[in-house]
Every structure is written in structure tokens, then in C-alpha cells.
Amino acid sequence: MSQVLPMPERGPVGSPCISVCRIEPHTGLCEGCLRTIDEIASWGTLDDAQRRAIWARLETRASKLPVCEQRKP
């Protein structure tokens, strides 16, 4: 699993994708960015507020991962 990148504080909100695109069957989350398949699929149509809400969820998800599953920076 992954440790999510920090959420952009200003400006356009980019994708958290780090090009490690595999859905973990037990969690339903991408191993690279921790998004669900629905979050990944809808990303291109979301406004910045919706994207920031997903980023906030990613930070929460990453904080709940066991240390051994977090990606080293």
C-alpha cells in the first residue's frame, strides 16, 4: 500500500496518482494513491472542492495503514 502525497494547498488540485495503479482486492483501494475505483473514474469531472475532499480522505486512509504497508517517501 501507499502513503499519500501531501494535498496541494492552493491552485488547481492535481491528481494524487503516482503511476502505481493496482486495486487491492481486500480494501478496494489503489495501491499507489489510495483512491477507490469510483474516485479514480470520476476525477476528471470533479471540481476543486470535490477533489480536495478526496485528498482529505486519502490522508485519513494513509494514516490508518500499518507502517509496514506505507510507501517510503
Image (cartoon, grey):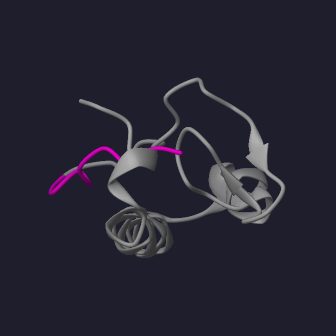
Q: Residue 30's x, y, as percent?
A: 66, 48
In terms of image quadrants, where is residue 35? bottom right
Give the total of numbered labels: 0
Q: Look at the image and give the residue range highlighted in magenta.
A: 1-10
Asked if the magenta segment contains residue 3, the reply would be: yes
The quarter of the rendered structure image containing the C terminus is: top left
Q: Residue 68 versus residue 4: which sits nearer the camera?
A: 68
Q: Tell me which residue sits at (74%, 36%) in the image.
A: 22
Q: Tell me which residue sits at (15%, 57%) in the image.
A: 9
Helix, strand or loop: magenta stretch = loop
Asked if the magenta segment contains residue 8, the reply would be: yes
Q: Is residue 40 left or right of residue 48?
A: right
Q: Residue 2's x, y, as percent?
A: 46, 44
Q: Tell me which residue sits at (79%, 63%) in the image.
A: 26
Residue 12 in view of the camera = yes
Extreme-top residue of the structure:
19
Say above or below: 26 vs 19: below
Q: Tell me which residue sits at (39%, 72%) in the image.
A: 64
Q: In this view, does 34 lie to the left or right of 70?
A: right
Extreme-front residue of the structure:
68
Extreme-right residue of the structure:
25
Q: Residue 52's x, y, as percent?
A: 38, 68
Q: Residue 3's x, y, as percent?
A: 36, 47
Residue 13 in view of the camera = no
Say above or below: 39 vs 24: below
Q: Residue 25 versus residue 38: which sits nearer the camera?
A: 25
Q: Is residue 27 left or right of residue 34?
A: right
Say above or below: 4 vs 55: above
